[in-house]
Image: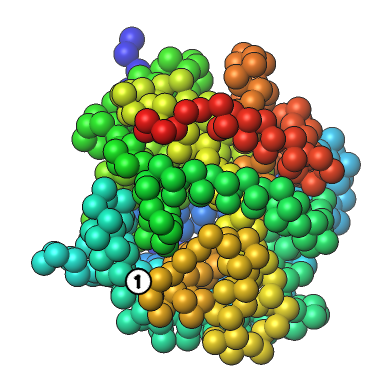
Amino acid sequence: MTQARPLTFDQFVYKRPDLEAMRHEFEKNLREFSQATTPAVQSRRFARLNALRRDFVTMYNICLIRYTCNTADGFYVKENDYFDAELPGYEELSNQFSKALLNAPFRDVIEKKFGPQLFTLAEMSLKTFTPDILEDLQQENALITEHTKLKSQAQIAFDGKNYTIAGIQPFEQSQDRDTRRRAAEAKWQFFADNAPAFERIFDDMVKTRHRIAQKLGYRNFVEVGYARMKRSDYTPEMVANFRKQVQEIIVPISQSLYERQRQRLGLEKLKYYDEEFKYPSGNPKPIGTPEEIVQNAARMYRELSAETDSFFRHMQDARLMDLVDRSNKAPGGYCTYIPNNKAPFIFSNFNGTSGDIDVLTHEVGHAFQVWSSSGFPFDEYNWPTYDAAEIHSMSMEFFTWPWMHLFFGEQTDKYHFSHLSSALHFLPYGVAVDEFQHIVYENPEMMPAERNAAWSALERKYLPQRDYEDNAHLSAGRLWQKQNHIFNSPFYYIDYTLAQICALQFWSRDRRNHKAAWNDYVRLCKAGGSRSFLGLVALAKLRSPFEDGCVESVSGEINRFLESVDDSGF
């Protein structure tokens, strides 16, 4: 008997949720949950409350995907506006759920079944919400949408044609230096022309978030940001020490790699528009059309493991990927999850660069993780906290190394060298973004020019090779404005750097013993969000990035590998 084909994403039914009707049923079940006289009654109400939450999140994510795939779709523009206004009300219900959970009459029964992390997450969520901030949350959501729309509608004029932000990137990696320079200038002209809008949106975001923090009883938004990110087992002080290790250990290695690049390219000085152009023969580019790339990915995941084979076939059959850049599509890449359909969804903007493969394997890591932990009945355990989630995505980039020849052919060694060196280059930039946000939110009264000056100082600290030539916009400290996370996901970015250290450990372990490393990775994926960040790191048999010596140990092994490669012929 043949198995029925799954519903495809375009067949998923969307219906705007009626929040008031949901509120009525939710509060009724919440009362019965809180007043339960037996574990069985409590369990039934718990299941019903989670079903109501899944219904809402399902519709929200279908809307999010269809809106970001086409920000000019009038219907989903209105639906997205609806969620901007109503999500704070949903958060209020979730806040009531957290309070009830912490005071459940048979809390020990739930904790025995699901572990203590669910209650830790409930405690964290109570730190980030009060009904007094509903209007502020609506304002924050509206500003995030305004920022997304501004970037998604970018039309960058270059050599007689218009390009999106993603679409201009291949020209920024051209073998012709003048083309690189002009493409970079064209892209940054868009940001310069819109600098007043970017700075006004961000200024409003900072003020709104500071107001939220004060209403919640905090000194500033830093504490709120950490609580939103569900960081229960490390502090800003531990993160600051991690940044210090990156500055002392990684920055010198990164600078030596930039010097090797300058010598390879035969340049007197590496300019900002040269940094992403790695080799005289050109950067490695993926072979084939987007459709052929996906077919090669299917082969790769079929050969990697039975689990990834089953998963990726479903992603194809249900059409749960939108990968190619086009006008009016939101920038960037993401993976989200539609719980009622048990469907991950991957969104990206292919543009013909090696980043297409990076983003595919990265987002597949997220999708495979949430697919693996979809058996948990609530969102808190379907996903881990963001710091742990990025371990899955970044590690998948390295577990797929043995199949990169499918995408790069004779350029595979060049890709491997680029990928690994880029991982080290990323760390200083990643911690600079994090420190910038600490400075901004600890000093919410700063003017836009002062924020730009703070960014310039961080570039001198973490990215001293940076030379903006005569680009006035970038020389004024505005490069940070390209980073979506700074606007839309405050304090997220450090998670990539912490996860990168963990992923590089998996790279090392995979080279020594693939079976053991892969089994630990799958175990990590199946655990979902059932443990804290450091708890999941331990479960995967990885060293904590905060542990003294960890950064040095990981970077040392990577640096030795890179030094052993003869890149002069690339």
Quarter location, residue 197: bottom left
Q: Seen in the image, is 192 located left or right of residue 512?
A: left
Across and down, in percent, residue 510 comes to 61, 21
Across and down, in percent, residue 475 comes to 47, 76
Question: Is 147 placed above or below 237 here?
Answer: below
Q: Residue at x 32, y 82 (%)?
A: 193
Q: Residue at x 45, y 62 (%)?
A: 17
Residue furthest out toward the left: 160
Q: Residue at x 38, y 76 (%)?
A: 470
Across and down, in percent, residue 19 comes to 52, 67
Q: Seen in the image, is 381 located left or right of residue 82?
A: right
Residue 132 is at least partly visible in this image: no
Question: Is 546 placed above or below 290 here?
Answer: below
The C terminus lies in which quarter of the figure?
top left
Q: Seen in the image, is 195 located left or right of residue 296?
A: right
Q: Amino acid at mark 1?
A: Trp
Label 1: few (<14), some (14–19) or many (≥20) C-alpha neighbours in 10 Å: many
Quarter location, residue 447: bottom right
The number of numbered discs placed on residues in the rendered structure image is 1
Quarter location, residue 318: top left
The N terminus lies in which quarter of the figure?
top left
Q: Which residue is mark 1?
A: 188
Question: Is 255 placed above or below 222 here?
Answer: above
Across and down, in percent, residue 359 comes to 42, 43
Residue 178 is at least partly visible in this image: yes
- Between 548 and 25, the one lying in front of the other is 548
- Between 402 and 116, the one lying in front of the other is 402
- Between 52 and 541, the one lying in front of the other is 541
Colour mode of the rendering: rainbow
Q: Residue at x 46, y 66 (%)?
A: 467
